[in-house]
Structures are given as C-alpha cells and as structure tokens.
Amino acid sequence: MSDEGGRPRLPLEGLRVADFFWLIAGPATSRMLSDLGAEVIKVETITRADQIRDEGTRPPGAPPSSPNAVFHDCNTGKLSITLNLNDPRGVELAKELVRRCDIVTNNFTGERMDRWGLGYPDLVQVKPDIIMLSMPVMGTTGPYRTYGANGIGVLAYGGLDANMGFPGRAPVGMGPLYSDFSSPYFAMAALMAALHHRARTGEGQFIDLAQAQATASLLGTDVLEYTANGRARPPEGNRARDFAPHGAYRCWGDDRWIAIACAGDEEWARLAGAIGRPDLARDPRFATHAARKRHEDALDAEVTAWTRERDAWQAMHLLQAAGVAASVVEDLEDLVVRDPHLPVQHFAPVLDVEGYATYTTHRQPMRFDGEVPPVRRAPLFGEHNEYVFRELLGLTEERYIELLVGEVIY
C-alpha cells in the first residue's frame, strides 16, 4: 500500500469530493472518504455554520480555533472553504468546484440543494458524470421530504427505540446517536457501487439515501415477523430469544460487568464446566434451551453467583478459553486505557492546529495490506480558501479579494 517513495498509498487517492454535509451523520460519511485518501472539500457558511464546530466537548480554556471533540471526530483530514450560497456568485463558485469533483454530498432536507440551484439536475449540466449523494433524514421524495431530525429522532422513527429497554417499561433509546454512525456505512456502500458503475459505463448517478430507512433496516427480521403473524415482539432487555444464558452479569468490583451468550446446549455445557458447575448442564431446569428459557431467572442467578466473585477481565479470558462468547462490558476508561488491544489497534491521538489539545479519535476499522489509514486533524473554518479558490478554481488575486469584500467568500 506504499508508492515508490515509501509513502502510504490510500485506496481513494485521486478522488475529489465537494462536501456540503454538516452535523454528524453526513460528515462521518465523508470522513471515511477522507481517511481513505480522497480530497474532501467541506463547504461551510457563516449564515448557518455547522453546529458541531461549537457544540460539544472542549478542553477548558481551549482557543476558539480549536474545534470541539465531535467536529474532530467527524472531519479528520478534510479541507474547509467558506462560501455564501445565498449569493448567486457563491452558487456559481460551488458549480465550478463541482466541475472539478467526482462526488457531491449533502444531508440537508430533501429540497434544500434544489432551492440553491445545486440539485442533481443542475449539477449534471455542469459535470455529466457527477455522483451525488443526498442523505436527508426522510429522503428526497415522499410526504416527509422536508422533515428534519437529529439522531434521537431518527432512532425513534426508525423503530429502534421501541425495541430497547425492558418488558412493560417505556422505551429507553440507545444513549448515543447510533444512527449517525451507522447510516454512513450504507452511504459508503452506495458510493463505492456508484463509482464502480461509473468506471464501467461512464455514467454518474444520484443516490437518495434516507437515514430513517437506513435505521429501520437495522431491525432485522422484526418487520417480517410482524407481517407474518401480526404480533410485535416486545423489548427483551438483556435477554434474547435464541440464547440462554444471555445478558450482562455483575462481577467483582464497583460497577463491573461481563456479557455472556450461549447459543445452544453445547455452549451451555462448556460454560457450566468452565465455572466449575458441570452439574448445571444436567439439571432438568437447564438441560435444554426451552427449559433454560422457562427458568431464566434461576439460570441468571447461578451464573451471577460465579461472576460476582471474579474480576471481569479474568472471567472473560477464562470463558473465551473454554469457547464461550464472553466480553467485558467496557467503560470509556477500559476502551482507551485498560484494554490491551483497542488503544493500540483502533484509537489514535490527533493534535489540534494550535497544539493546545490532543483528541483521541477512532481509526477506520479496516486494514489494507496490514496498514490502517492515517488520521489527520480536522480543518479550521475556511482554512483552505486560498488553495481551493486560487489554485484549484484559478481565481485571480483581484477577483478573490473582490469576492472576499463582497462576502461571497467569508
């Protein structure tokens, strides 16, 4: 994965993206493009600035030029330009940028780019083979195309919240804005398919990816089951219909837990032997999957009697050695400090431009020829105006200054 000079060669090098994404779900998508080598040019504006530049976790006393942790996480390696799209001259500059790009992205509501004159029908007049990805919450068609939401609304509308929690209780949601970090993988699959199609045919494509639909697809077979028998499965908490035992079990120490799952009688027998209780596998209450489900409270009590006397890490290693699916329920300190694997294999430090703070972010979870794509810092607001407008678009100094004074380029 290296060129002749030994520099890492990334899979998407040579690809250029005009990136109108904002907030999280969209930028997390174009971050993958950037991390994999594409030149991603983030188009920003003062009139409706990307909220995650300012909202979120920041170290105490951090200078204004140091973006918060969420922005760093979603915008690594990108370039940033500032453009007033409410001015016709700004729209024309945006089109000139598109002319030099392979992909255009946005996650505004379904009609916003069209109102600027930057919809797909407008852009194919500028660059016939352009690939455009639009990923509004509700898509670009249908009665809700103008509706917006953040992650908690997408999770609720997509049906995931109704599946979370314990029987007989109100939905509890998932805490993190899970859809913001799952929808990007659907988007990347669609973009790679469109690039492959263009390489074969020379044709661009318009990709309409609704975040709500991407989220509903995570329900798996629940929708099929309901349409087949007219019955909705209630939330099951930590339990699962096809596993017993299945749950998070308390371990020794303050708020320490281990997740354990056994899919059948053989796995259950291995668990019973590993905890020094092979008799449990022969106990009539637990001898079959159906019996274990009928006596699940008693089953969990037996497992907990063993786990609560043990360190979660030691219990995980012992059970894994016996062929039982088990994992420490890691908190954030586990993830970035205690775990011997993730801090080295997955997380990366990123120093902000001021050198004021180091942010820990994730690398992409894939390796190419044994190498993980490097992670570079997020851009300052408008940091790359000179490069994009003067070098890439070829504006003269006089014209560039004129557009700055006219607040077309901020």
Image (cartoon, rainbow, N blue to C red):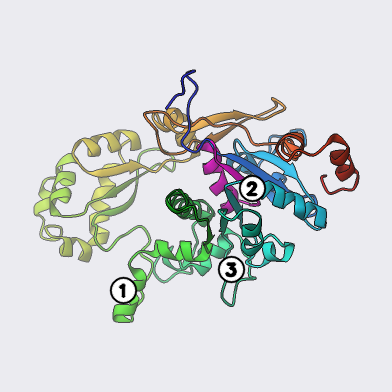
Amino acid carrying mark 3 in the image:
Thr
Magenta span: 14-36
Which quadrant of the figure contains the N terminus? top left
Q: Amino acid at mark 1?
A: Glu
Instruction: Report the residue at 41% width, 64% height from top.
Output: 217
Examine the image and state in which quarter residue 124 appears: bottom right
Residue 102: image location, x then y, percent: 57, 47
Q: CA distance from mark 1 to mark 3?
A: 29 Å
Q: Is residue 307 above or below residue 130?
A: above
Please indicate whether residue 232 sits to the left or right of residue 121 in the image.
Answer: left
- In front: mark 2 or mark 3? 2
Sequence-first disc among 2 and 3? 2
Q: Residue at x 23, y 39 (%)?
A: 319
Query: What residue is disc 3 on?
Result: 140
On screen, 154 above or below 247? below
Q: Is residue 145 visible?
A: yes
61 and 106: which is toward the camera: 106
* Label 2 crowd (10 A; few <14 / some 14-19 / many >=20): many
In this view, the residue in front, 348 or 164, is 348
| Residue 113 position by quadrant | bottom right
Label 2 – label 3 distance at C-alpha: 19 Å
Report the residue that reaches farthest toward the top. 5
